[in-house]
Structures are given as C-alpha cells and as structure tokens.
Amino acid sequence: MLRIFEMLVALLIVLVLAVLVALVLPDHGHVERRVEMPSPTRQVYDTINGFRRFQQYTGLRAFDPALQTTVSGPEAGVNAKVSWTSNVPKVGNGSLTIVKSTQDSDVTMALENDWIGTNKTYTITITPSPKGRTVYVTEAYDVDYGWNLLWRFGGLYINGDPSAVVQGTLASLAAMMAGFPNTDYTNQDISVVDISAKPVLLVNTQAPRSLDEVADATEAAREKIDAVLKKTGLTQSGAMMTITTEWGDENYTFAVAIPVSQASFTLDGKSYTIDAPVPPPEDAEGGASDLPLVAGDRDRKGLLVVDQDVRAALWYQGVALYTEYTGSAAQLPLVRLNHKAYAETHGYRFSESGLNRPWDEDVSDPGVADDQRTFRVYLPITR
C-alpha cells in the first residue's frame, strides 16, 4: 500500500513539473527560412499572390508528389484560395487563403489543416538585397497555442514538418522561377483581353535582326498581299499585323498579315471561304503531299493557299495578354518577353505555335517619328 502511495506521489510530482514546464513554454510558435533569388520583385510577388502555380512549388509535394489541388476565389489577392487533398497522413487535407497582400512586399495566407494550434498563417516577405540585383524571399510560419498545454509541448517540434514545408516551398519556388524570363515588367501595362477571330491574308517571311531589313521584308510581303487584295476585291479592315514565329540569334522569322473585310472571296472565277487552319491529310508515306500548291489547297500548316506566297486564315479567337506600347519597334522583343514572364508568374499557358503565336499591330498615325510609333502587342494564352 505504501509503495502504491509513493508511486502516486511521484506521478503527481511529474505531472506538476510537466504543468510548470508547459506554463513557461511559449504560447506562440514561429519558424522562418530565407532564400536569395535573382528574380525581379514584381515577378516573385505575382507568383505568390495567387495559387495558379502552387502545385508546382509547394513544399507539400516532398511528402506527397500526387497531391491534388483546387484553386478557387479570385485569381490573385485577398480571398484567393487553394485547397488540397492527400492520402498521405503527414499531408492530409487542408487549404490556404490569402488574407493580406501588399504589392511587391508581402503576402499572408491563413492555413487550415490538422496541425496543432489556431490562427495558423504563412507570411512570405520580399526584400531587395543590398546588391540590388537579387531579392531575399522569407517565409514564416506562425501559430498560436494559447493555454492548451499539450499544444505548447507540441510546439517544441515546430522545426519538424512545418519547417520542412517552408524550406521545401522556398527551394521549389526558386527553382521554378529560375526558368522564367528574367525581365522586370513592373512598368509595362499588361491586361487580359478577349479576342474575336478575324479573316486575314498573310505572308510568311524572314529577315536579319535589324530594323531596316525587317522593314524591307515587311514591305515586300505587304506588296504581295496588296496584289491579292486587288485580284479578289477584298479590302483591308484593320491594322497590319506582325506575327512572330521565332526571334532567333541572327534572324527574325515572322508573318505579315492584313485583316480583310470578309471571310469569302472569288479568285479566277472560283469562290473560297477563309476559315481556321486545317492541316491537310497525310499521304501514304506518312507526310503531307509535296505536289505544287494551287489556290484552294492547304499548306503544311493548314493555311488556305490563295496565290503563291499568300495564305488566308481565320485568325485567333480566345484570350490574350495585351499591351499598348509607344516607342521604337526595336523595343518590341522586350515587350513580348515581358508578356511571357507575366504569363509564367500568373500561371497562364502559352504555346507560340500555329494561331497561338504572339503578334503586334502597328496603329501609328501616318508620318509619326520612328521612336514614337504605337503598337498593340498580344500574346495568346490559356487561363
């Protein structure tokens, strides 16, 4: 009996000591990690201010590569939300919701999952480094334990899973953004617009990367299209388009396109309809026919052949990034590159092939100086 009494006293002493220890343990948990990145501040901010790229960079994937995510709410900013499900117990189900967002500075997200504690948040802060060419990205995890003594003891393990997720997220974010075009689009006005399809006549061409030679190639292509306009009775119905195929190290491959007044025309007594490109059937050898093309045929890209080098197509319908730019045409490659970077950070897909190639329209007034020309620049995207 005495031994039982001694054991109970010992247990009571241990319990009292445990309570005393718990009372002096912090009622709040905090862990943070930092990484230095060469990406522009705005790129980092736009990437974390929404969840369209979350699946690619979240540290949770280190525990469950098959993690399933669902994005809801606005695309970016306060109330943007991502939810996830996982069959891995360490990950489980949960969600993040943006509750505070300061442009180019910080984003705070409320966490809902089965980790201990309340008021669980992640805060990602962006700070330019003293070098000026990089930024420090700091992610902090915060949680309240209150007077729950078991939670306070659990907080001793905050450097376990919570810390691993933070560290994994920053590492994956840096690796992912290393593949984005390293260009700062902060001062470029970029919007998302809906585009209606329009019939165009176009000529594919190429020129060395100089303004004069590109202008000469453009003028030669324009003359070929003008000749077809006269033959068909079609009229120009919009600004000339320059459709980029490839901005190479030495040469610029592109198409010159002119929107036309209607999608049907008559040439040499035959009627034709301009529609979306339809690739021709393959021959028995597994490739498109090499027979000479005549009006009414389809070339290898599915464009309607009109006359020698002139093709026709019902051009792109969908969503695109858009910028109206005024300045020298020499800066257009940078404007297009900024569109690509913007698409990457916002989780928009783009392919730059077929009808999805970027294009710009010269809407300058006649006689305007070369460094004051106005262009409407587009990049087709999928949201």
Image: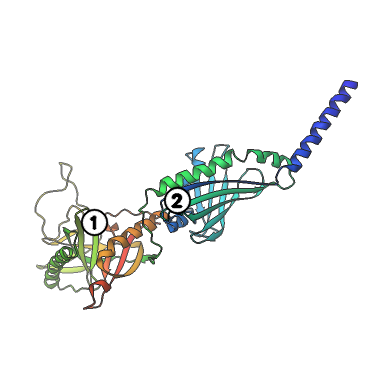
Residue drawn at (27%, 74%) of the image: 372
**Horizontal arrangement in the rendering, residue 93 relative to residue 24 (left or right):** left
Residue 321 location, x and y as percent? Answer: 36, 62
Mark yes or no: residue 314 visible. Answer: yes
Frontmost residue, 54 versus 367: 367
> Toward which corner of the image does residue 26 lie, by quadrant?
top right
- Expressed as whole percent of the image width and height from the top left, the position of residue 358 reads 29, 60
Circles 1 and 2 in contact, beta carbons < 8 Å: no
Mark 1 → mark 2, Cα distance in angstroms: 27 Å
Local packing at callout 1 (Cα closer than 10 Å; few below 14, some 14-19, many 20+) is: many
Residue located 70% across and 42% down the image:
152
Q: Is residue 236 above or below residue 99?
A: below
The x, y position of residue 264, in whole percent, is 20, 68
Q: Which mark is residue 53?
A: 2
Q: Which of 31 and 135 lies nearest the eye of the viewer?
A: 135
**What residue do we see at 86% from left, 29% from top?**
9
User: Which quadrant of the rendered structure holds the C terminus?
Assistant: bottom left
Image disc number at residue 245? 1
- Residue 313's x, y, as percent? 22, 62
Looking at the image, is 212 positioned above or below residue 95? Answer: below
Secondary element type, mark 2: loop
Q: Residues within 10 Å of mark 2 (few under 14, many from 20)?
A: some
Amino acid found under the numbered disc labelled 1: Thr
SS type, badge 1 = strand
Residue 211, picture quadrant: bottom left
Q: Is residue 1 visible?
A: no
**Label 2 sits on what residue type?**
Arg
